Image (tube, grey):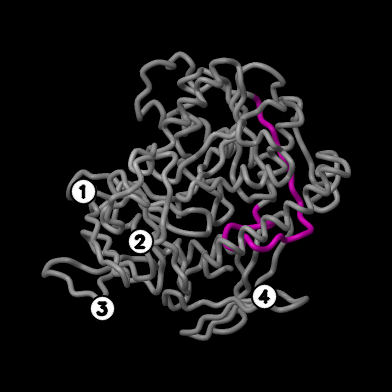
Amino acid sequence: MKRELEASARQQRRAVWLRLGRRLGGERLLFLAGRVLVHLKIEGEERIQTEGACLFAFNHVSQPADLLVNAVIRRRRPDVYIFGAQGLQGQNPLALFLERLGDHEAEQRMLRAYKARGLSGGELLRGCRILRTGGAIAIAAEGEITWDGRLQHPLAPGAAWLALRSAAPVTPIVSCGGYDLQPRWQMDRLWLPGWLTIRVGRPIHLGHELAAGTDSQVVAAANQCLWEALAALLSQG
Amino acid sequence: MIPLLLWRCPLCATDDALEQIARRLRGDLLRCRNCGAEWRVRRVPGDNFYLRLIRGGQSDERSITAWYDAMKATVRLAPITDPALTLPAGETLYLASGPARLQAEETDPLFFPGPWPAEAARADKREVQGKTVGAGRLFLTDRRLIWQGEAATCAFPLTRLNSALALVDDGLVLMVEMRLYTVRFLTESLLKWVTCIALVAPQVEAATGHRIATSHF
């Protein structure tokens, strides 16, 4: 309980600073802070589709890197939905964080990822409907933040499943250099300065001809394809 | 802290032996309480953390990722004993936790006998509410996960365990059939538990065909 309260207080403090930043200049200030504090570079931002169905699959190295990746996506695609982890107490840390930040529509744009096998099925179906009606979703394809900084293999199956079921193109996005900002083993500390590059890849189609009747082998093959796309992006530069 | 990742000394292979010592304006130190090895921690912005061995062996600097690989290479499932737990013949104990706290669904009959509010009993799994069971210890054998708590003791056969996933850096989420449990370890790494359950999982699958999903480690 003490740890939860500490985490909540920590998040509250961060949110106060971020809310202040939002008032002073919104995401422009976030990008300015990104450039000053983490030498933020963005490559291939023009590849983020501004309309039509699209799944943005990104790697999951740390919370500050994810925040900036999502901000980059939202800058060109403000209607994007996001997946956020849901706890056993019903708490949704990402929604709470965004609300504290002043984003009062966060809950509506949120798809809940449940920390147990199969429990996110309902939200995946909802995600599929969003994509089929031309919406966009951002998803951390690995499912969990990496422990050691490497791209985890295999990816969680959700992104591949959504892409196959909806036939939506997948835009791979990676953040390089974000691991040492806040590694998973020390989430109470933000290490600055840093060097972060966000790289956006070309949209790919994961076997859209297989949109019906996917089975675990097809999902695994599509998953591997997506992993390779992310790994290739990471190895660039 | 680093011992959450390096939950075992990569040199002497002792579990929970590393401690991180924070130092102002200098790199932190990482020390093994068992073999006395000491590393200096250095962060390279935009890259990784590097640990240089400064005591307990030849000077050696590697990334934390490489040290993690070295640690993982020492991990094997080995039988242990614990005076707090008596097992039937033929069952092997692999891991015993220190103090931990368990949280279960508020309608879990194992820990919270009813009656429950009607809306709680009907709750969609996505709306489920957790409730603290209390303090205790968790044990992993080749057949079961055993919770030995102040309030209650219960055993979950591994053939009923669907997944064991790490919740960020906070706790281990177990899905036993369709029931959710969260275990928070107070003095040790949850990654150790994920790793050991992931090592037992192939044995369970080979013997029974039952698959257990785990987090990456």
How far apart, in angstroms, are the residues tagged by discs 1 and 4?
Answer: 44 Å
Q: Amino acid at mark 4?
A: Asp
Element on which disc 1 rests: helix
Magenta highlight on residue A185: yes
Percent across and percent down for residue A100 are 70, 47
In three-dimensional space, the C-alpha distance between marks 3 and 1, rounded to whole angstroms, equals 29 Å
Report the magenta residues as a range.
Answer: A179-202
Q: Position of residue A136 (x, y in %)?
A: 62, 24
Q: Secondary structure beneath disc 2?
A: helix
At label 3, the amino acid type is Ala
Q: Residues within 10 Å of mark 1 (few under 14, many from 20)?
A: few
Q: Is residue A81 above or below residue A30?
A: above
In three-dimensional space, the C-alpha distance between marks 1 and 2, rounded to whole angstroms, equals 16 Å
Label 3 SS = loop
Residue at figure coordinates x 68%, y 47% from the top left? A65
Front in this rendered view, residue A86 or A201 = A86
Same chain for the residues under marks 1 and 4 in the image: yes
Q: Which disc, if any, is residue B84?
A: 3
Residue B84 lies in quadrant: bottom left
Q: Is residue B57 magenta?
A: no
Q: Is residue A81 toward the left or the right of residue B108 in the image?
A: right
Residue B206 image label: 1
**Most distant residue in the left direction:** B89
- Residue receiving disc 2: B196
Q: Residue B24, image x and y in percent?
A: 75, 77
